Image (cartoon, rainbow, N blue to C red):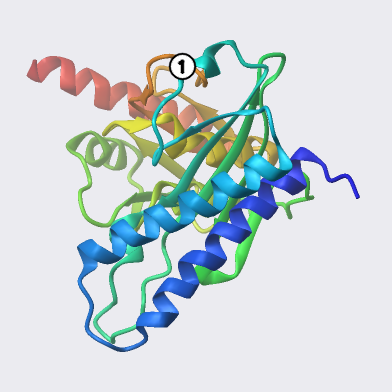
């Protein structure tokens, strides 16, 4: 049976997620070395995705965090942009109660020469959740009077702190980029602003899913995010509810002006 690109993206993300959960289950409550677990997890998830893409999408190009960048992708009609494990730090950690953290993700997106991002899936395996561009995503609740903004649990930047101050927003700390973007989609937060440097695989799938759900996405200067470029870097990103675009962009402009004064 033929499946759509949307369904394939979800299948790929779910399959990699199963591998990642299985690795942690094998450890159980035993002592472990986080660095070794990260390395094993990245490799295992990459291997599963590569095998499935070779079987189900032969001939398509692939851009992955965990594989050599084949620049033939620049001339390809279809390119899968994948992050087998977004949030290796979160994946390899337990909380204070000894419970494995759940704020990590698997990203799978499809870029086409004709339409740009056309399909995508973000799986949050430890939460049993996968959102993709082929499904109807329930509307999120409207933002409240005090906006909530997703911020890094480990290293919030001075830029984001300035945005929070300008918005008088409540920071909500969480892990990986995929978790932050999906938290905008499901209404946990109203915005995700990032200016600390990322790569194409960090945001392609989250942006595809967020756009499909009706969210606003752009670079912090308001320009569109362009994928399958030679330069892998995507330095900054906004994902937010359409109702707060003006407020967020104004706060971002204020934060940028402060950076200009400091330089």
In the visual, does 97 lie left or right of 5? Answer: left
Residue 48 in percent (x, y) is at 54, 54
User: Does dot 1 land on a helix, a strand or a loop?
Assistant: helix
**Could you tell whether 5 is left or right of 112 in the image?**
right
Q: Position of residue 136 (x, y in %)?
A: 79, 50
Work out whether residue 217 or residue 110 is closer to the camera in this orientation and state it: 110
Residue 119's image quarter?
A: top right
Closer-to-camera residue (20/90): 20
Hey, which residue is sitting farthest left in the picture?
262
Residue at the image point whose x is 72% and y is 14% from the top: 114
Q: Judge from the rendering whether residue 219 lies leftward or rightward of residue 210; answer left or right.
A: left
- Between 142 and 97, the one lying in front of the other is 97
Is 30 located above or below residue 203 in the figure?
Answer: below
Residue at far top of view: 75
Quarter location, residue 104: bottom left
Q: Where is residue 241, by image quadrant? A: top right
Picture quarter with the C terminus: top left
User: Residue at left 68%, top 51%?
Assistant: 10
Residue depicted at x 58% and y 10%: 75
Q: Residues within 10 Å of mark 1 (few under 14, many from 20)?
A: some
Residue 145 visible, this angle: no
Seen at 27% across and 38% down, the residue is 160
Asked whether 159 or 201 is in front, the reply is 201
x and y percent of residue 174 in the render?
36, 58
Residue 1 to residue 78: above or below: below
Residue 127: x and y in percent read 54, 70
Q: Is residue 115 visible?
A: yes
Q: Which residue bears the numbered disc 1?
A: 71
């Amino acid at each position: 049976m033929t499946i759509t690109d949307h369904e394939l993206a979800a299948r790929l993300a779910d399959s990699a997620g199963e591998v990642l959960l299985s690795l942690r289950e094998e450890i159980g409550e035993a002592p472990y070395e986080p660095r070794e677990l990260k390395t094993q997890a990245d490799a295992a998830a990459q291997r599963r995705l590569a095998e499935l893409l070779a079987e189900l999408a032969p001939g398509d190009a692939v851009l992955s965090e965990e594989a050599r960048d084949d620049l033939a992708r620049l001339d390809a009609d279809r390119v899968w942009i994948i992050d087998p494990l977004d949030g290796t730090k979160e994946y390899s950690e337990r909380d204070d109660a000894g419970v494995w953290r759940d704020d990590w993700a698997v990203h799978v997106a499809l870029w086409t020469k004709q339409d740009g991002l056309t399909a995508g899936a973000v799986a949050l395996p430890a939460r049993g959740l996968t959102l993709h561009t082929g499904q109807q995503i329930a509307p999120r609740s409207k933002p409240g009077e005090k906006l909530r903004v997703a911020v890094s649990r480990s290293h919030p930047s001075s830029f984001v702190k300035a945005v929070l101050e300008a918005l008088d927003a409540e920071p909500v700390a969480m892990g990986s980029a995929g978790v932050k973007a999906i938290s905008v989609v499901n209404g946990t937060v109203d915005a995700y602003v990032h200016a600390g440097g990322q790569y194409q695989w960090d945001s392609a799938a989250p942006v595809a899913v967020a756009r499909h759900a009706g969210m606003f996405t752009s670079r912090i200067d308001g320009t569109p995010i362009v994928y399958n470029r030679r330069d892998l870097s995507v330095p900054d990103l906004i994902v937010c509810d359409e109702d707060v675009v003006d407020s967020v962009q104004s706060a971002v402009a204020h934060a940028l002006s402060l950076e200009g004064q400091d330089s």
